[in-house]
Image (cartoon, rainbow, N blue to C red):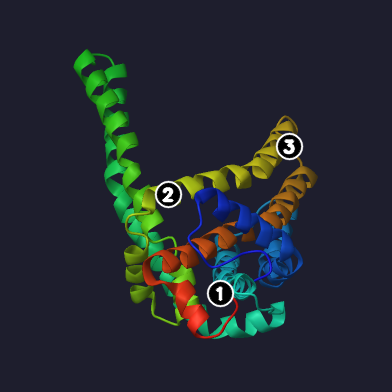
């Protein structure tokens, strides 16, 4: 392997190797993102330039982005995996390999979204209930008891947000599993849940670090957009839309790098994948 090796990695090593692969594959990763996200990006810019679009147009853009996003996810997983295992893969070849996995990735994305949303319902209901009680307390005739109940429900809702976070961490390697093992969406979710058992808190920490890194450029764009709020214009909206789209194209694949390496790290730890590769005579 060029920069990595198949062995159990510490959290710091996982991040270091992920950034290393991201740097090494930066051009092919961006090529895949441009091919798959170029059309939705241009349509979003067109909508911003028109000052808004109809619901049908917006839905169509989201649908195109969803379908091509599935292609990008599968192709990126292939590209990162082959690089990590010491093999070269061109963006075009990665996209061709990804086409048969598109349907499964789309079903998986919908399934993951549904599961995470359901797991977040108790938190959302608690927060909504807290807001309702707080509103009653502010009305004429409201009581301190209502305000206290609202505050407690709000705190409970915030605490319950831990549930969807850990659910997401448990399902975080479902996409690499589906793409690289050629399994269905349901089995990929079960596979991810089994692989991540005992390591979910670690995965939450890794994802938190990546989230911070990814947020920095978007916060800068948000600040730029805020500077235009006093006198918003079509040009400023287009500028912010273009900047956001370009940042997504460039930094988005970093998350795939981390999740793919986490997938392999878990397989090494739980299934001796490193020994399996050695037995197969592949570089390790």
Q: Residues within 10 Å of mark 3 (few under 14, many from 20)?
A: some
Crowd around label 2: few <14 · some 14–19 · many ≥20 (10 Å)? some
Considering depth in this image, is 267 or 53 the residue closer to the camera?
267
Q: Residue under circle 2?
A: 202
Q: Residues within 10 Å of mark 1 (few under 14, many from 20)?
A: many
Mark toward the viewer: 2 or 1: 2
Q: Quadrant of the C terminus?
A: bottom right
- Asked if residue 232 lies left or right of residue 187, the reply is right
- Residue 94 image offset from top left, x and y in percent: 64, 80
In the rendered structure, which disc, 3 or 2, sits on the residue that comes first in sequence? 2
Q: Could you tell which of marks 2 and 1 lies nearer the N-terminus? A: 1
Q: Is residue 150 visible?
A: yes
How many marks the image carries: the answer is 3
State the image coordinates of residue 105 (x, y, percent, origin top left): 48, 74
Measured in 3D between alpha carbons, the distance from the residue under mark 2 to the one under mark 1, in whole angstroms, is 24 Å
Rendered view: 124 above or below 194: above
Query: Between residues 40 and 15, which one lies in front from this camera angle?
Result: 15
Q: Residue at x 38, y 48 (%)?
A: 201
User: For this view, does 70 lie left or right of residue 51?
Assistant: left
Q: Which residue is mark 3?
A: 224
Marks 3 & 2, CB-CB < 8 Å contact? no
For discs 1 and 3, the disc positioned in front in the rendered view: 1
Residue at x-position 30% and y-position 40%: 160
Answer whether residue 143 is visible to the viewer in this image: no
Pointer 1: what residue?
Answer: 74
Provide residue 196's location: percent of width, then percent of height.
37, 60
Label 1 vs label 3: CA separation?
Answer: 33 Å
Question: Label 3's element?
Answer: helix
């Amino acid at each position: 392997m060029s920069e990595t090796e198949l062995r159990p990695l510490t959290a710091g090593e996982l991040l270091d190797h992920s950034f290393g692969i991201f740097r090494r594959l930066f051009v092919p990763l961006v090529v895949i993102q441009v091919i798959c996200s170029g059309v939705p990006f241009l349509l979003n810019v067109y909508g911003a330039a028109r000052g808004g679009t109809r619901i049908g147009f917006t839905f169509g853009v989201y649908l195109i982005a969803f379908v091509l996003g599935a292609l990008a996810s599968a192709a990126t997983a292939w590209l990162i995996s082959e690089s990590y295992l010491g093999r070269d893969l061109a963006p075009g070849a990665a996209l061709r390999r990804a086409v048969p996995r598109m349907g499964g990735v789309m079903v998986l994305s919908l399934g993951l979204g549904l599961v995470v949303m359901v797991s977040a319902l108790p938190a959302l209901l608690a927060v909504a209930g807290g807001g309702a009680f707080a509103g009653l307390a502010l009305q004429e005739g409201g009581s301190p008891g209502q305000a206290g109940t609202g505050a407690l429900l709000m705190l409970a809702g915030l605490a319950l947000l831990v549930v969807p976070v850990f659910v997401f961490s448990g399902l975080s390697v479902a996409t690499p599993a589906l793409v690289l093992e050629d399994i269905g969406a349901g089995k990929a979710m079960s596979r991810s849940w089994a692989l991540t058992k005992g390591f979910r808190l670690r995965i939450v920490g890794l994802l938190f670090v990546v989230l911070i890194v990814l947020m920095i450029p978007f916060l800068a764009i948000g600040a730029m957009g805020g500077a235009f709020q006093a006198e918003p214009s079509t040009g400023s909206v287009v500028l912010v839309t273009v900047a956001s789209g370009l940042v997504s194209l460039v930094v988005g694949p970093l998350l795939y790098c981390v999740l793919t390496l986490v997938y392999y790290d878990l397989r090494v730890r739980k299934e001796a994948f490193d020994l399996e590769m050695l037995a197969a005579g592949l570089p390790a």
